[in-house]
Amino acid sequence: MKEVLMDRELSILKDSVKSFVKENVLTAEQSQMGYLKELSEIEVASIQAKAKEIGLYALGAKKEWGGADLSLYTRTVVYEEAAQHRLGLYHPAVDGFSAELPSFLEKCSPRQIEKYVKPAVIEGEGCFIALWEEHEDNQIEKITCHAVRSGDDWIINGHKSYIQKIDQSGFGVILVNCQEGNETQKPTIFILELDDPFTKKDTMLIDVQKTCTLTFKDFKIKDIRRIGKVGEGASLMKKWLAETQILLSARCLGISIKALNYAQEYAQMRITRGKTLSEFPSIRTMIANGFMNLKAARLMVHDAANKIDNGENDGIIAAQMAKLFTTETAAKVIDDCLQIHGGAGFAGDLPIERWYKEIRLARLDLLKKETIIENIARSINL
């Protein structure tokens, strides 16, 4: 049973996260010389140790694995606060709260949990997801990576692209279409180990995010590494996608709030043509619209999180809508904030320049706009 917090407890938790970020994360980022791209492993480990001391660790993992077992809704509140710093969109609290593990790991066997899941929680490591392929157009049903049964093994062939955070993960999972004899292909999830003999190619995206492409050629994997039943993989991945879309949306809220704070402060300080920027109607409109749209986005994110927590049928489409609206809103907010700052916004002293690049990637992550719009249209029988 996920931990459900009352309003007062949530408020206390939110304040704790805000203080933690201010005292540990912002201090660590501001201590760096030059342009900051990432913190060292030693610094991240130190922040993780401090988070573990106060219980802000492995937030979604089950308690028997060593986690906090917080509900998805509670985690959206946490991550909105934890993202309010330079590296916060893709590394909230610089990964100090440990990486999120997919909920479908509950389907792991006791042996898999002991060998892979618990060590990942203890070490603060995540689990990389080899889901998307270069040509499947965000449609799980169109994946081509496949596996054929061979005794107690499966032989995998194919490619997986756009995989994030392999270097920070203790293990990975892959979705493939399994085929036994003349049966139809059935989407199934398997566990990958970091030293498995697949080919890995790194790609840097807009100088702020590294992704990997994995190639499997006659790759043999034991059936004991299968998660769940044969054919159950697509439904498990779709639930993970919904949860991850909601958490990405929460982080987008966090950086957008911080960007608006920067814009508001700068507009009240910067004087042009004899008055502050905040006195110009166009600037006031940008900032006011930003706060209004983020409030609407937050309501969508919280609604979707509650639907997923409660197992409601429309939770997946609600998560997709929240992801689309929030990333589009964040993109507009950050673009406006960059416009308000002018050349100062590009200098790199503030994180707005980094967020401007990252939000472009976030809009494509975990289903792009066009796919979500089509899914919404289908959901209303259009």
Image: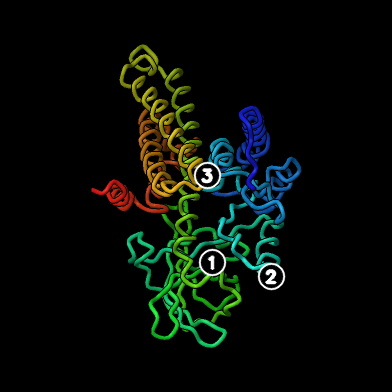
Residue 318 drawn above or below residue 121? above
**From the viewer's perspective, is the residue at label 1 or at label 3 nearer?**
3
Neighbourhood count class around disc 3 (C-alpha, 10 Å): few under 14, some 14–19, many 20 upward: few
**From the viewer's perspective, is the residue at label 1 or at label 2 nearer?**
2
Residue 163 drawn above or below residue 371? below
Which element carries disc 3, helix, strand or loop? loop
Residue labelled with disc 3? 310
Residue 230 percent coordinates (x, y): 50, 73
The mark that comes first in sequence, 1 or 3, is 1
Residue labelled with disc 1? 173
Relative to 150, 376 lies left or right: left
Residue 236 percent coordinates (x, y): 49, 60
**From the viewer's perspective, is the residue at label 2 or at label 3 nearer?**
3
Residue 333 percent coordinates (x, y): 39, 33
In the rendered structure, are the residues bearing label 1 and label 2 in contact, judged by CB atoms less than 8 Å apart?
no
**269 and 24: which is toward the camera:** 24
Which amino acid lies under the numbered mark 2 shown in the image of this protein?
A: Arg
Neighbourhood count class around disc 1 (C-alpha, 10 Å): few under 14, some 14–19, many 20 upward: many
Residue 310 percent coordinates (x, y): 52, 44
In the rendered structure, are the residues bearing label 1 and label 3 in contact, judged by CB atoms less than 8 Å apart?
no
Residue labelled with disc 2? 111
